[in-house]
Amino acid sequence: MSRFGSSTAFYTYLLLSVAGLGGLLYGIDVGIISGALLYLGKTVDLTVSQTSILVAAVLGGSMLSSLIAGVLADWCGRKKMMVVSGLLFVLSVVLIVLSQGFWSLLAGRILQGLSGGVIAVVVPLHLAESLPASTRGRGSAIFQFMLTVGIVAAAGIGVYYSRGAEQAIAAANGNATLIRAAQDHAWRGMFLSVIYPGSLFLLGTFFVSESPRWLHRMGRKENALAVLQQIVSPEEAARELREMDSVEPKSSSSSQSAAGSLLQRKHIVPFVLACVILGCNQGTGINSILGYLSIILKQGGMSALEATRGDLVVKILNCVMTVVAVALVDRKGRKFLLMLGTGGIVLSLLFGGTLFRISEAKKVEVADQMRTMVQGNRLTVSPEFVRRDSGDTTLTVLYGYGDGDRIATLSSAEKEPLILAPEPTAPTAALQIHRAFVAPLPSRQTAWLIALSLALFIAGYSVGPGVVVWLALSELMPTRIRSAGMGIALLINQGVSTLIAGVFLPVVSSHGYSAMFFFWAGCSLVYFLTATFFLPETKGRTLEEIEAMFANAKKA
């Protein structure tokens, strides 16, 4: 980029920095809940469904804002929507940190999701419409790279506050008030710490210029040329402007809506292809795995501290492999990386699902036995009840007092008993034991193999879908339908993600972790076949050339 002169290089770095901060916030949105879940339910009364909703709320908020963001980005511009996303993020952090119950937490998480949805639509859109073809792959991949940095940052924050909380809990010597205060401080501190990058992103959005292709569509060609000249040489800027004129000579007219353009035959193929890719991208289970990674590792046989550290290591790997993908995306191409990544995802999920299945096949149902142990609407279970001759075991109980199911676990290695008692808000609600089973904890070797399968999953996702999906989405969509089409595709993306995150805890409570792993493997197989047989290569082509390619293919 330096060959275009110091002024163009400075603006390009500014644009990439602000876009990178947007990716950072999106990654934080996804990852921050993982560490917080270890303490959130211990200080706020939450059912299994409410916990799942809080995890899925970010994805649901993103789903709601995705379609609206595309329409608003067409109406008022990409830059203004980036400013809005920064404001929403800062407000969400304030609301979550000050919350005292489920509903205020839910509102804050939805605001985070709304911010993430706008970022996911507008930032890749702005980059794709601003950067030249020669660097668009690497430049757009910066968004995904910083997204992984955000996930790593969230995991690091989780480790930091978890270590402090565990030290405070140990020093409390059983004092329930001090223990609760340490747990409460841990999850609130995790959320509060992310307000700083959010504020920096919000500040940066005021200094970037509007997308040149949006300005061209609005008939502001002189402004579009001026923005292009901030990024490329004057000759290249003039050439790109001529291409815009030739591909879409009437794009500034508002007589034809984007919705109508979506129905044109030449737009249907790239639009449907983008929607399939976005839907399958979440079908891999990526957001659920990132959101529940600490829980999955703990269920796989690790301690709480080991799980948070493993969570951090896996997410650092995600970041490192994204760097590799950024270096390869403009050399090896989008199609090759997507095939390589999705193939690795299928194998890793089958491996991890098999490991969980081996352990879950040995579980013993004890619900009837536990119902006979209920006394005075309370249940106390000692660690001796959980111990079996097969070694370390864990008890999982799905229960409820009145409305809403809750889940509790007790390891045979623990010293304190598990106590189920009514909440102060519903002191007369009857205890109902829905399911309860004792299963052997995976061995240390199996625990590390499960961690390895998740590491391979993250590596495959980072190399392929992680970088390519955002780039392919912005490249496949023709200019006339790009913002609306991206909004609809991301609506599908977030809808699938929200559904999977919402059913994760209920499914694993009833059917085990292997069921989710095998389901994700099936979706990933569809992803691999789509990338292999239907996705065209777009490496090195301008957006106008890609659009012409689909139009010529339809004519042929």
Image (cartoon, rainbow, N blue to C red):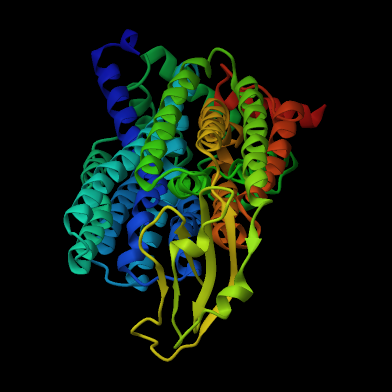
Q: In which quarter of the image is the N terminus?
A: top left
* Residue drawn at x 21%, y 47% as measured from the top left: 164
**Quick check: 541 above or below 18?**
above
Q: Nearer the viewer, residue 89 or 510?
A: 510
Residue appearing at x 58%, y 14% in the figure: 332
Q: Which residue is situated farthest in the bottom direction here?
A: 428
Residue appearing at x 45%, y 30% in the figure: 318
Q: In this view, does 534 lie to the left or right of 40?
A: right
Farthest residue to the top: give it: 3
Question: Where does residue 363 sit, x and y in percent of width and height?
Answer: 64, 56
Regarding residue 473, the answer to whether it shows in the image is yes
Q: Which corner quadrant holds the C terminus?
A: top right
Q: Toward the viewer: 510 or 361?
A: 361
Task: Tally the marks.
Answer: 0
Q: Decide: is 134 above or below 48.
A: above
In this rendering, is residue 56 above or below 370?
above
In the shown orientation, is residue 187 left or right of residue 266?
Answer: left
Asked whether the viewer can see residue 255, the reply is no
Residue 340: where, in percent of width, then height? 64, 23
Residue farthest right in this picture = 556
The x and y percentages for residue 239 are 48, 17
The residue that appears at 65% across and 48% down in the rendered structure is 514
Looking at the picture, tell me which residue is in the foreground, 383 or 420.
Answer: 383
Say which quarter of the image contains residue 43: bottom left
Across and down, in percent, residue 458 comes to 52, 32
